[in-house]
Image (cartoon, helix red, strand yellow):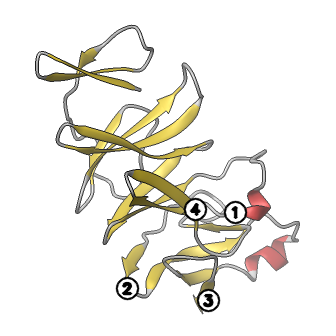
Amino acid sequence: MVVTKENNKLRVSNDFYTFNDFSYHVTNDDKNSVHLGDIWFKTEKSDFYLNYDYNTTQKFILYQVNGESISRVATENVPIKSVKTYLSNVYYLTRYQRGLQDADQTTNLKYATHNNGQWSSDYLGKTGFYYGFDTLGKVYDWTIDKDGISTFGYQRAEILSSDEREKTFGQYKIKLSGHQHELLKP
């Protein structure tokens, strides 16, 4: 997305040729689902814009909008499905897709932090786990507090039998930084 300022107005373009006036429209009130492309939504602390950049990178990009300032928070290969803020960080869930490279080396729960004018992100929780969704795609709420993030999760990226995978189903508490979680309730 390209952002320019003309005559004291912000103008945006997704194709680098056609520019439109930048305006904010909330299009999603559901905290746990965000649909593809050109979606505006609010969290408790910030306004966000989610865009699927089909024309150039073919990635899903999350922007934070703060008045006339727009900053790229995160770029993902898979859809960003839920976004929350806590303290000064942005937390989000991505949707699992078959063929996702390195799924055994990451999770779908991510966080982004803003330091020295730059956003950086990392995954949270135990590698290979999938949080916030069950095997049929049902969405579970997730809460954030000083002790971590609580939500449903299970081991997805390992080659497991159905019975072995089912034994990993449970409510987890995921630390706000690092790659650890605790099983609260199977």
Kindly report the distance in space between the C-alpha atoms of the residues bearing marks 3 and 1. 18 Å
Give the image location of residue 167, x and y in percent: 75, 83
What label sits on residue 151 in the rendered view?
none
Residue type, label 1:
Thr
Asked if residue 3 lies left or right of residue 140, the reply is: left
Residue tagged 3: 183
Residue tagged 4: 122
Give neighbour class at mark 4: few <14, some 14-19, many 20+ (Cα, 10 Å).
some
* Rendered view: 77 above or below 93: above
Q: Are marks 3 and 1 in contact (CB under 8 Å)?
A: no
- Marks 4 and 1: which is nearer the front? 4
Task: State the SS at label 3.
Answer: strand
Mark sitting earlier along the chain (4/2): 4
Kindly report the distance in space between the C-alpha atoms of the residues bearing marks 2 and 1. 23 Å
Give the image location of residue 10, x and y in percent: 20, 24
What label sits on residue 106 in the rendered view?
1
Mark sitting earlier along the chain (4/1): 1
Residue tagged 2: 146
